[in-house]
Amino acid sequence: MLEITVGEAATRTGWSARMLRYLEFTGLVVPERTAAGYRRYGTLELNQLRALADLRRVFGVELGEIAFALRLRREPALRAAVDTWLAATTPSAAFLEWEQRKHERLLAA
């Protein structure tokens, strides 16, 4: 089984060691730890790092956006709050009709 250090993972993937630590902090890529607390990257984590780089390149998203998407999956209360906010930003048909009548009255005056 492949197990490499943070420095070796940085070299293999093109991410800096500092960025790998940030990715672990945000929960995007979390390597196993040795009994002494050292990070050990295996095949799974290396594949996650490559896929994350592809995701950023192909879709043009930032790490903060991906970390937020992860939080939405892990925190139901946050997801519900965002869903509620998004629903409120989409005007209903009744609201649009009311606005249309308001503008017509203003133009007629």
Image (cartoon, rainbow, N blue to C red):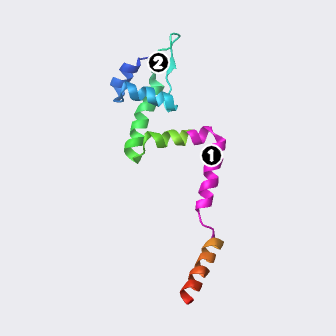
As drawn, the label of residue 68 is none
Considering depth in this image, is 85 or 39 the residue closer to the camera?
85
The amino acid sitting under disc 2 is Arg
Q: Which residue is mark 2?
A: 39
> How many numbered markers are drawn?
2
Reply yes or no: does residue 86 show up in magenta: yes
Residue most toward the top?
36
Residue most toward the bottom?
108
Q: Which residue is mark 1?
A: 79
Q: Residue at x 42, y 27 (%)?
A: 20
The amino acid sitting under disc 1 is Arg
> Which is nearer the N-term, disc 1 or disc 2?
2
Q: Residue at x 41, y 47 (%)?
A: 59
Judge from the rendering whether residue 78 lies leftward or rightward of residue 24; answer left or right.
Answer: right
In the displayed structure, 56 sits above or below 31; it is below
Query: Residue 65, how many percent across, how many down?
Result: 48, 43
| Quarter residue 4 falls in | top left
| Quarter residue 12 falls in | top left
Give the alpha-carbon distance from disc 1 to disc 2, as whole Å.
31 Å
